[in-house]
Image (spheres, grey):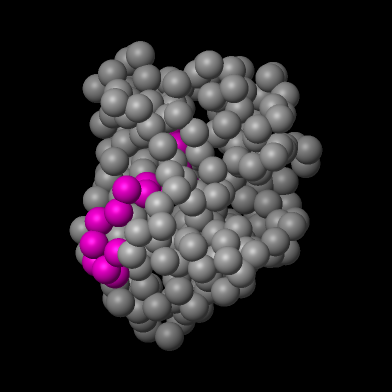
Amino acid sequence: MNNKVIIVIPARYASSRYPGKPLAPLIGASGIAKSLIERSWLAAKQVGGVAEVYIATDDTRIAEAAEAFGAKVLMTAENCANGTERVADSLRSLGEMPDIVVNLQGDAPLTPPWFLTALIDEMRGDASVQMATPVLRCDGQTLANLRKDRQNGRVGGTTAVFDSNRDALYFSKEVVPFTDGDYAPDAATPVFHHVGAYAYRPTTLKAYQSWGICELEQLEGLEQLRFLARGIKVRCVEVEARGTVFWELNNPVDVSRIEAELKKRGTI
């Protein structure tokens, strides 16, 4: 193993739920608006021990915007089915392969650096782990947000269940496991929110491209289910919020949630 780590942020313009999402402006604590993709890139740049951060896209509008704020861009094919395929396709443009490829999804600018560091440490600590992803135990407020989205017909965050070895059993856009309990806003719950990031070995990532879309992946719209369907274990790494709020930009309603957290953190 060469222990080299890179972060790749996949971005596409034609989101079915939020067209043009990567270029959507988000206002920080200073009142300055920066695009979603720039804020995701800035989040990735906070992670230590990473050789390079790239944005992977097939769209010239996103590429030009990324290069304007100083990012390195890897152009990909137009027909990538999801972010993992886009990250895999971007490796064609690299010379030396890293040992670990981290995928920070371009709609997760609130991802704290220690979430990604935890993934990298897990992969470095166990060479048998082919893929890892962070999970965050929901407090009562986050669980309430997830439930509210589903009640209003919106697909919000993703939840995860895993075994005693912390290997995933399933991921879903429904709230799993089922619980009808009432929880205080700051109380721990039995539900784990899946964080939009992955770490892979390049060989496993390349194999993913060749497998084709599986039924569960298509039904749930969750790319990581292709690994489970092929018998590849996905290590769930529990991370802590440390007083921060994590939420992805899945729908326009999420803009205000994310901007509020940016201001709370003092992110300019």
Q: For the N terminus, give its image quadrant.
A: top left
Left or right for 127, reference 96: left
Image coordinates of residue 152 in percent, x first then y, are: 61, 69
33 or 262, nearer to the observer: 262
The percent coordinates of residue 102 (x first, y second) are: 44, 36
At 45% from the left edge and 74% from the top edge, which residue is drawn? Answer: 257
- Residue 71 lies, in percent from the top left, at 51, 53
Q: How many marks?
A: 0
Please say whether residue 195 is visible from this viewpoint.
no
Horizontally, is 218 left or right of 187 in the view?
A: right
Q: Nearer the viewer, residue 94 or 100?
A: 100
Q: Is residue 26 depicted above or below 97 in this figure? A: below
Q: Which residue: 24% across, 62% down?
A: 187
Q: Which corner quadrant of the image does residue 239 belong to? A: top left
Magenta residues, as a range?
A: 183-199
Q: Residue at x 45, y 37 (%)?
A: 198
Which x, y percent locates residue 49? 28, 38
Q: Is residue 161 visible?
A: yes
Which part of the image, by quadrant, shows the C terminus?
bottom left
Q: State the image quarter where residue 109 is shown.
A: bottom left
Q: Is residue 222 magenta?
A: no
- Residue 195 drawn in magenta: yes
Residue in view at x 35 percent, y 78 percent = 263
From this view, report whether residue 200 is shown above or below residue 23: above
Residue with the most extreme right position = 79
Asked if residue 253 is positioned above or below residue 131 in the image, the reply reads below
